[in-house]
Structures are given as structure tokens and as C-alpha cells.
Image (tube, helix red, strand yellow):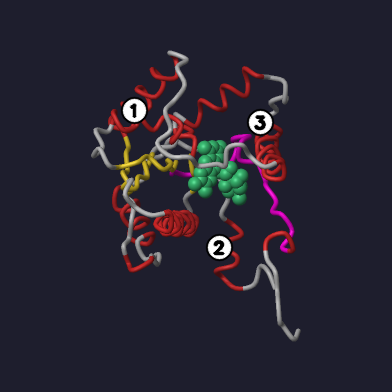
Amino acid sequence: MTGTGPFATLAAARRSVRGFRPDPVPRAVVEHLLETARTAPSGANLQPGKFIALTGAPLRTLIDDLAAAIDTNRPGVKQYSYFPDPMPPHLKARQRAAGFALYAALGIDRRDLDGRRAQFRQNYRFFDAPVGIVVTIDRRMGAGCYLDLGMALQTFLLAATDAGLAACGIGALATYGDVVHQSLALPPDDLVICGLALGHEDTAHPANKTRTDRAPLAEYAEFRGFAS
Ligand SMILES: Cc1cc2nc3c(=O)[nH]c(=O)nc-3n(C[C@H](O)[C@H](O)[C@H](O)COP(=O)(O)O)c2cc1C
């Protein structure tokens, strides 16, 4: 049943893109994507979260501030915990598989720490995309509100794919949430959840050859009481 219908085709076409052409994305296009993202449902229609879209000088300033912080070698200060800590082994295996798929596409050997570090730093350059978006949520929100924001994020990613654009979530941005917070002078109660890189895919960029798979449905879902 997979792959039928325009929505399934769109959902299957979306993937994380980490190499972009420099062509700008006009404000009206970014607004359209965010208006579409806002159609996502949310518990009690709270519509939690905020998207701060940056391009040009404001994006460069944030990237420069992140580079300066990373250059000091001081660890980042997360504003929330994205992943379980410690990571259970079966999830660690999935994380490693995703990482190795990216490194294999880039031709970076697993033991090439400098190569891996260089790719890590690309997160903090928004993969040189023309648009970087910082996604925040008010720290007083409940866990369910993070679900709501996730739905808006996926709607955004699908809208970008539908518009012929490419994007990648950047959870790594949260690792230096304190730097982002200060650089953008965010309100005290806002937490940096993730970033989004947005632009036109550079189809020749090796990172964009990365392909991921998914765990079997049997690991993901249970079916009880179905007659057929
Ligand atoms: C919220 C979110 C945060 C992500 N953070 C990062 C990140 O920091 N760096 C990165 O290279 N990819 C990041 N990704 C991309 C995931 O690695 C990717 O979605 C996953 O490996 C599945 O691949 P696909 O998106 O191509 O289907 C993120 C994705 C999402 C949805």
C-alpha cells in the first residue's frame, strides 16, 4: 500500500538535504511554507513554538557567533535534552547507521575524526543554506506541546519538498542553545529546539547522496483485533 497517491509520493520524496546552491529563497516563499506549517493540528489549538527565519547578514552573524563559541572548545549548553541519555543500544544502532550513511556518502572514514568534526561543524553553518530557521518553544510548555511543534516541523518539511525546495532539521543547534539564545536576543523563557536549513538542493553535493532506511513496521506498530 505504500507509495500510492500524491501525498505518499510527497512524503517519500522528502529527505534531509545537507548541500545547497547559493540561490536565495524569497521571503514570500518562506512565509508560504510557514503558513502551511501553521495548518498543523495542536492540542487545544495552542500552536506552540516559534520559527525565526534568517538570511543574509543576520544569518551570517549567528553563524559567526556559533563558530566563535565552538572555536573556544568549550562544551555547548543545551537548553533541553533531545535524545535519551544514556541512549539504549537499539537506538544507538539507529543513530550510528544514520551517521555512517552520511559519512559514507561524503567519503569520510569512520576513523577520520577531522573529517567527522568538519561535517559536525557544517551543522552550525546551516549547511551553507541561504535560509536558516531557528525553532524555539516556551520552556513552560508541556511535553505534548513538543509533539505539536514536531507536527508543524514535518508539515514545513513537506511543504518545502512540495515547493521544489530542500531542507534539513538541525537538532545539533540545540547543543549550543545558549549561544543561539544570546546571539538572537531571544526572550528568557524561549528554548532553542532545533534549526532548519532551507534552500535549493545542490544535487552534485555528495552529502545529498545519503539515504536512510526505516526499522520494520513490526518494530514500530502493533495490530490487535483486525479481521484482515
Ligand atoms: C528535528 C530534526 C533534527 C535533526 N537534526 C539533525 C542534525 O543536527 N544534523 C544532521 O545532519 N541531520 C539532522 N536531522 C536529519 C536526520 O538525521 C534525518 O532526518 C534522519 O537521518 C532520516 O533521514 P531523512 O530525513 O533523509 O529521511 C534532523 C532531523 C530532524 C527531523
Residue located 43% across and 43% down the image: 196
Residue farthest along the bottom direction in this orientation = 227
* Other-residue count near label 2 (Cα within 10 Å), few / some / many at <14 / 14–19 / ≥20: some
Label 3 SS:
helix
Q: Which mark is residue 60?
A: 1
Distance from mark 2 CB to nearest ligand 1 atom below 8 Å: no
In this picture, which residue range is highlighted in magenta? Answer: 198-217
Q: Quadrant of residue 191?
A: top left
Q: Quadrant of residue 197?
A: top left
Tell me residue 80's x, y (percent). 43, 39
Label 2 SS:
helix
Q: Which mark is residue 106?
A: 3
- Amino acid marked by disc 2: Leu
Q: Which residue is mark 2?
A: 10
Q: Circles 2 and 1: CB distance less than 8 Å?
A: no
| N-term mark: 2 or 3 | 2
Please say if 11 is above or below 71. Answer: below
Residue located 46% across and 32% down the image: 175
99 or 130, which is in the foreground? 99
34 or 130, which is in the foreground? 34
Label 1 SS:
helix
Magenta-drawn stretch, dominant element (helix, strand or loop):
loop
| N-term mark: 2 or 1 | 2
Question: How far separated are the C-alphas under marks 2 and 1?
Answer: 32 Å
Q: Circles 3 and 1: CB distance less than 8 Å?
A: no
- Amino acid marked by disc 1: Arg
Residue 29 as seen in the image, left or right of residue 75 = left
- Amino acid marked by disc 3: Leu
